[in-house]
Every structure is written in C-alpha cells, then in structure tokens.
Image (tube, rainbow, N blue to C red):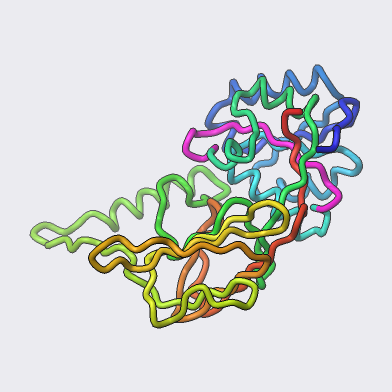
Amino acid sequence: MTEVATSDQLLVVIDPVARRTDGESVRIAKDVLSAGATTKVCLPDGPEEFARALSRRGSRRPVVIGDDRALLRTVALLHRQRELAGCALSVVPVGAAGVLSLARSLGVPTGAVAAARAVLEGAERRLDLLVDDSDGVVVGAVRIPAIREVGVEVDASPHPWLRTCQSLVRTLAARPTRGARVAPVPGPGPSRLRVEVDGVTLVDLDQPVEAVTLTPGEAGGARVEVRPVSVGAEASPLCAVGRRVTVSGADFRYRADAGVVSGPVRRRTWVVREGAWGLTLPG
C-alpha cells in the first residue's frame, strides 16, 4: 500500500441518492472529513453534474459519499477520462444495505465515521480492473446470464416526479385484467457458450452451461467459474485464472457489477488491467 497524505485537499462529491437515503450519515461523514482536511463539497443533482464535478477537481483527491452504484459510476467516469491510473479514489459508503456489498468486499468500512477516518488516515491500494472490448469496466464481477437482482437496477431518471410517473405506469401495466390468467415468467435457461481463457477453451458449445462468472483477482489474473448443466448428480464447476477471457456463442446478456443488463451480444472479451485503479483503505 501507498500512504496517503492527510493534508491533501479533498473534493467531496455527495451522491443525491445518499442524501435522500441517509442524510444523517452524509452529514456525519462530511463533518469528519472537513475537520481533518481542506474540503470542497459538491452536491450534484444528476449524472451530468456528477461527471462535471469530477472533471473539474484539479489537484483535489476525489471522495465519493454514496453507495456501490456511485462508486462504480466514478470508476467508469475516470476510466473514460483516462485519469483512473493516476487517481487515488476514496469512498464513504452511504445507502441501503443491499447496495453496499461491493464497498464492503473491497475492504472499505461501512460506518460513516470509520470510513471517513480511513479517507484521512488510510493508504492507497492498487486494484485490478476488467475492461471489455466496448471499453466497459468491471470492479466486482460479470455474471452470465444476467439474472435480475433486487435493488441493483440503476435509476437514471433525474426528476422525482418522472420517477413517480414511471412507477405508476409500471404498476398499471403489471396489473392483470379481470379474469385474465397470469403466466409465470420463466427464468433463464441453459446457454451454449464457448469460454476461452488466455486462448484455451474452458468449455465449448457442445456443453450447455447454467452460469459463467468472471471476477478480477490479484496479480493480474481474472477468476473464471463455469457451472455446467447438471444431469443427475450435480456437476462440478470448471475454474480457471487468466488475463484474457472471451465468451462467445448464441446471443447472451450479462450484468457487470451492479449495473444494468448489457446485450444481447454474440461475443465479448474482457482483459485484466493490473493495478489499474487505486482505492484508499484503512492502513
């Protein structure tokens, strides 16, 4: 780890979802940060202002107060600006418990006071990143097929009244007419995919699979797990570690981290960028 100077000037970007979800934790974190360093606080109202605040940070060290989605948005923005490699990012997790799991798995304290103190007193740790052939980034995991998970869809609507209208429309559309039979929604079935790790085929199209998972590990390697369809006895997962992973076959969808579902695509390649980004963690 690389030590982070406590005298750094901080750009504190507070995600609007965090302000609505837990304003008290936001206030506590802001007070701790302001007491320990020179801070400039930004309160963006939407994704555009969020991106603009980051791009105008100058020499200030960015600190994001928000949930996993705010952290992922920041990493993606800095990657697109080609400023991720030279930036020590800090995060104070604030939000619903279901969308703080990524920060917790990375080693960030989930309490407002402890996380803010880690920003001031912690050290930078360089972490690997997965980058796909469409310039998308992955911090936590890629999952194929993209099974819907509760609480992970990104709501990009900038106005509360628009979100309310959209919610009402979804409710009315989902309400069945009187006497109508409601058919169950089937889950994703087996897929026929070819998974190649560093040019070596881990599973081919003749073996249907239930799921494929990719996670950036350490020392420049991605962990790949393929779960074949079980016939009779449960099939053991196929595992490998490599720097370049290509998935191809019939149209498939995937979910990267807590983002929206991507696809359908017939081919996607992920490459590990070793030590591509830095996160401030307790020393």
Question: Residue 17's spot in the image, x, y percent?
Answer: 57, 38
Q: Is residue 86 magenta?
A: yes
Q: Residue at x 40, y 56 (%)?
A: 148
Left or right: where does residue 34 sit relative to residue 5?
left
Residue extending farthest to the left is 179
In this orientation, which residue lies closer to the viewer: 22 or 161?
22
Q: Is residue 17 above or below residue 240?
A: above
Q: Residue at x 85, y 37 (%)?
A: 2
The image quadrant that residue 274 belongs to is bottom right
Q: Is residue 21 above or below residue 199?
A: above
The quadrant the N terminus occupies is top right
Question: Residue 115's spot in the image, x, y percent?
Answer: 68, 27
The image quadrant that residue 70 belongs to is top right
| Region of the chain picked out in magenta, as a range | 85-100
Left or right: where does residue 198 sit relative to residue 32?
left
The image quadrant that residue 244 belongs to is bottom right
Question: Residue 94's spot in the image, x, y percent?
Answer: 59, 31
In this orientation, which residue lies closer to the viewer: 33 or 144?
144
Q: Residue at x 27, y 56 (%)?
A: 174
